[in-house]
Image (spheres, rainbow, N blue to C red):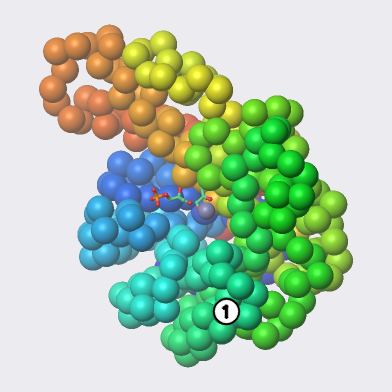
Amino acid sequence: MPLVNTTEMFKKAYEGGYAIGAFNVNNMEIVQGITEAAKEVNAPLILQVSSGARKYANHTYLMKLIEAAIIETNLPIAVHLDHGDSFELCKSCIDGGFTSVMIDGSHLPFEENIALTKKVVEYAHAHGVTVEGELGRLAGVEDDINVSAEESSYTRPEEVEEFVSRTGVDSLAIAIGTSHGAYKFTGEPKLRFDILEEIERRLPGFPIVLHGASSVIPEYVDTINKYGGNMPGARGVPEDMLRKAASMAVCKINIDSDLRLAMTATVRKVFAENPSEFDPRKYLGPAREEIKKLVKHKLINVLGCAGKA
Ligand code: G3H
Ligand code: 13P
Ligand code: ZN
């Protein structure tokens, strides 16, 4: 099975009422943990690489790791650029074998976002690569942010049809109240499903992407805090909200922070229990196992994509 783009997986996900997990990768143990989990439950996958991860691990190393995962799993896997910030970066990833890219022009004025996204789409589509665009900016949602500032960061449903038709994007990332990182909510977690519903109504059958979708699993935060860490108030998106989004138009759910937490909690625990440990396999091995356990849980219980490969 060669690498795939996201067209087929999103079509099936939309029709089936589930979402594909898009997991961020930057080293071998993360790639192995995720792909071994997907193999065990027969799930399609998106492995995504941020610009920082690509700098850290090197494009070729990451591609070769993902190619190895394809050989080992025989699953449909897309390799995706996460938060591409320029045409040049998208082009370099496309030329280097990525099958999907995100061009994130969400910080730009509407017309500039359209122009940049359209340019990436033209190049990508000529190479069989799918493109994710973004409208609206993810907020660091805080209870004390005044409503108009809060509202202004959400995706404006009245812009989505024009953006999609003028750019030709294959999927659209939207902002409905999630945020990146481990500190998503200070008060009650709240997502604007009304905005998602309105976007779904305006773009029937069109795949929507949810960023900032880690649940910030409390057990990991507790373990980190127990063994010398300091993450008070870390809080993520409740899993039932993610399941609801996956049953709607959301076809891709982005998860990075939960992987980081799983890995860090495990490594901290190993060192706390064995302060003299110095064999990397003894802490990276258990970290890889924890990632596998976490991803299996997400694929089966949160995304609903187990058995859909
Ligand atoms: O959306 C951001 C992802 O979590 C990637 O983070 O740029 O630190 O690799 P990063
Ligand atoms: P989290 O920080 O919630 O894992 O979000 C990851 C993400 O959106 C990557 O693009
Ligand atoms: Zn993101």
Q: Is mark 1 within 8 Å of ligand 3?
A: no
Query: Can residue 58 be seen?
Result: yes
Residue picked out by circle 1: 112
Residue 80's image quarter? bottom left
Q: Residue at x 86, y 66 (%)?
A: 201
Question: In this rendering, is residue 110 above or below 48?
Answer: below
Query: Can residue 253 be seen?
Result: no
Decide which of 145, 128 is in the foreground and name it. Answer: 145
Q: Residue at x 55, y 23 (%)?
A: 233
Question: In this rendering, is residue 195 above or below 144?
Answer: below
Q: Is residue 142 left or right of residue 234?
A: right
At which x and y percent is residue 263? 37, 31
At which x and y percent is residue 174? 67, 59
Q: Residue at x 80, y 49 (%)?
A: 193
Count of numbered badges drawn on the protein? 1
Amino acid type of disc 1?
Glu
Decide which of 71, 140 is in the foreground and name it. Answer: 140
Question: In this rendering, is residue 11 above or below 275?
Answer: below
Instruction: Give the quadrant of the C terminus.
Output: bottom right
Residue at disc 1, secondary structure: helix
Q: Residues within 10 Å of mark 1 (few under 14, many from 20)?
A: few
At which x and y percent is residue 76? 49, 63
Instruction: Give the quadrant of the N terminus.
Output: bottom left
At which x and y percent is residue 221? 48, 22
Q: Is residue 264 left or right of residue 255?
A: left
Q: Is residue 24 left or right of residue 8?
A: left
Residue 79's image quarter? bottom left
Question: In this rendering, is residue 30 above or below 101?
Answer: above
Q: Residue at x 38, y 50 (%)?
A: 25
